[in-house]
Image: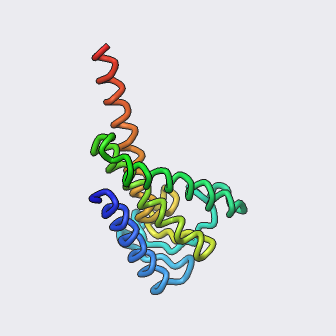
Amino acid sequence: MLYLLLIVAVLVLDRIVKIGVSTNMQPGDTIPVIENIFHITYVQNTGAAFSMLQGHPTLLIVFPAIVIGIGIIFVLVMSKAFNRIFLFSVSLICGGGLGNLTDRMAQGYVTDMFDFRVFPVFNVADICVCVGCGLLMLYMIIDANKSGKKK
């Protein structure tokens, strides 16, 4: 149940930030937080990460929905069989994925806003997906090393 709450918390935080940006800014508007280093820039991204796969909305809805569904099943049904770090990682990925999927299904694009000027603009959901994937990879490497040492 804790991991389901994490998924919902990520989704709610992502929605709050996106609604704040989209109601107070126009697409393309930018607010310098630290001039030429970090800005809040309102971008409507119709593609996936780094605007890839633009023009393939069905793929960008169906594939993430399947992956998120599988992740939620892991978290809800099989949580006793998995490590807490694994479940935390999957929950971050699912929460972030749901945030972007919600945007894509409702609007046809994902709202992005964090702009470091040397990297594509991203959002809270993207951060959670990336952190979740990073933790998951670390967990898998550590777990594989533990398994290898036992043999």
Tell me where residue 57 appears, x and y as whole percent: 68, 63
Left or right of residue 127: residue 46? right
Q: Quadrant of the N terminus?
A: bottom left
What x and y, as percent, mark residue 37?
40, 63
Q: Is residue 7 above or below residue 148?
A: below
In which quarter of the view is residue 18 placed? bottom left
Quadrant holding the C terminus: top left
Report the front residue among 17 and 103: 103
Q: How is the image coloured?
A: rainbow
Q: Residue furthest bottom?
A: 24
Q: Quadrant of residue 93?
A: bottom left
Vertical arrangement, residue 147 with respect to residue 49, above or below: above
Q: Decide which of 133, 29 is in the foreground and name it.
A: 133
* Residue at 43% in and 62% down: 125
Q: Nearer the viewer, residue 59 or 123?
A: 59
Q: Is residue 10 left or right of residue 52?
A: left
Residue ID at (34%, 18%): 148
Tell which of 45 and 78 is nearer to you: 78
Q: Which residue: 45% across, 51% down?
A: 71
Q: Quadrant of residue 39?
A: bottom left
User: How many numbered discs, if any?
Assistant: 0
Rendered position, 6 above or below 142: below
Q: Position of residue 24 (x, y in %)?
A: 45, 86
| Residue 110: % across, % down | 55, 69
